Image (tube, rainbow, N blue to C red):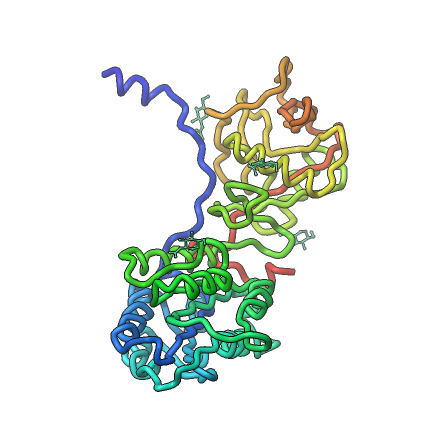
Amino acid sequence: MLLFFLFAFSNAALVDRQCGSNLQNLWLDVVAVIDNSDAMTQSSMQSVIATVATVFEYGTVIGTDPNNPKTTRVGIVTYNSQATVKADLDKYRSIDDFADNVANDIGIVSSSGESYLATGLEAAEELLFSNEEDPRGHYRKVIIVFAADFGGTGQLNPVPIAERIQTSGVTIITVSYTQDPYVLEGLQKVASPHNNFTSGGQDLISNIQNSLLQSNCFCRSYWRQYRLSYPDYWTPKFGVCLQPFSQPATWKTAQLFCRNQTKNGYLANEYTQNKHDFIFNMTQNAGFPQPFNYHIGLFFNANKWVWDQPEGWTQPNVSDFMYWSPGYPTSSGSNSGGVNYQMGGGVAWRNIPLYTYPAYFVCEVASCDTDNYCEITDFF
Ligand SMILES: *[C@@H]1O[C@H](CO)[C@@H](O)[C@H](O)[C@H]1NC(C)=O
Ligand SMILES: *[C@@H]1O[C@H](CO)[C@@H](O)[C@H](O)[C@H]1NC(C)=O
Ligand SMILES: *[C@@H]1O[C@H](CO)[C@@H](O)[C@H](O)[C@H]1NC(C)=O
Ligand SMILES: *[C@@H]1O[C@H](CO)[C@@H](O)[C@H](O)[C@H]1NC(C)=O
């Protein structure tokens, strides 16, 4: 009875949108880069084949489909002293085609004692970026390295090549087939942060799948993804993108601007202290001047404070988290919006009139992810 009472009358905490997590809707371009030098044993090779096949077995649509943009292309590169493209991104036309042929394409261990990951990475880069008019240019790209050795210096040093590839927005995942500390350390330098794994870990498949889902969760050009920490780019992401605008507008004009800026845009919502702090960090980084003063999606509607949403969507009530400046909200008429206004070294909420108070502002929109396909035209 008491439980029911609490449940019925407490305001549920609002949570920010999560990244899509549906592997059946994965839309990526992925290249597996596989060491087949003699450092790999035949059983390691079997394990690579099983891993590559299993990662996509949860219903990912392999290939392309004119009626469904949520598809994933997979390429296969092996390397020892040099790289061999075993499957380009257009080879596999379906999950069955992929399942039937991937083992044969990956093949067996070679007799080469050399293992130059640099050559494999460059071959993968070539597959991913060769088509300048690529209709899938806005798809996220991922390289998964499977290796048991780490060779190459000078031109053949894989680390600067990996850095260059990551700078083009590619996530690099590594899976080590040895516990040799030298190899582990080398692969960790090649991998995107938190994306270095080892074989034998029982969570390997789900770790790779989570990396793919996180890679598939991203923002359109000029938007910045909300994540746990603003300074640390590689903390877990939310399925929400933000953009600060350094141009004064009234609350109402800013709301319309956000709605027009991108499909289903709205003024930023602050459901938690972390989101509030993240947005503040972002606006400082964007050079908002002091005293800090910017519109967020807070407004007074039908006798309660609510959060802005895309046109026609339900506006959640401000509940759980509130961050009013002392003395606010002042007795508000129906025409109040909300700003973050400087208070000490931070900012806190104040209510302001909707139509006469210009300030900078922050827009928000859902990320592109497995639940939300973004058209290539969304990127301009
Ligand atoms: C990945 O690299 C980090 C940093 O060196 C290390 O602490 C971690 O153990 C590595 N993870 C795996 C699975 O090897
Ligand atoms: C905001 O920036 C400060 C200083 O860099 C940092 O300590 C804090 O963790 C950041 N908060 C968020 C949510 O990004
Ligand atoms: C923004 O407004 C312009 C001009 O009215 C219109 O052409 C465009 O489609 C709008 N964009 C969005 C995302 O609503
Ligand atoms: C907001 O709160 C009001 C009562 O103040 C309630 O009637 C309404 O259902 C709530 N709306 C949402 C979206 O929770």
Query: Considering only vertical position in the picture, is 104 above or below 58?
Result: below
For the residue pair 58 and 306, the one nearer the viewer reads as 58
Query: Considering only vertical position in the picture, is 92 above or below 21?
Result: below
Query: Considering only vertical position in the picture, is 305 above or below 217?
Result: above
Q: Is residue 311 visible?
A: no
Measuring from the top left, give residue 354's x and y in whole percent. 68, 28
Residue at point 63%, 13% (across, down)? 327
Q: Give the number of callouts.
A: 0
Q: Is residue 3 visible?
A: yes
Q: Where, by quadrant of the figure, is residue 330 drawn?
A: top right
Residue at point 39%, 70% (across, down)? 146
Residue at point 44%, 57% (across, down)? 195
- Image side of residue 280 versus residue 211, left or right: right
Residue at point 29%, 76% (across, down)? 41
Q: Where, by quadrant of the figure, is residue 230 drawn?
A: top right
- Image side of residue 55 versus residue 288, left or right: left
- Image side of residue 318 versus residue 251, left or right: left
For the residue pair 329 and 321, the one nearer the viewer reads as 321
Q: Quadrant of the N terminus?
A: top left
Query: Which residue ends up furthest to the left in the rendered image?
Result: 1
For the residue pair 7 and 31, the one nearer the viewer reads as 31
Query: Considering only vertical position in the picture, is 234 above or below 59?
Result: above
For the residue pair 175 and 306, the one nearer the viewer reads as 175
Q: Quadrant of ligand 4?
A: top left
Q: Where, by quadrant of the figure, is residue 88 drawn?
A: bottom left
Q: Quadrant of the C terminus?
A: bottom right
Measuring from the top left, give residue 162's x and y in whole percent. 54, 67
Measuring from the top left, give residue 152's x and y in whole percent. 51, 75
Measuring from the top left, give residue 22's x and y in whole percent. 36, 56
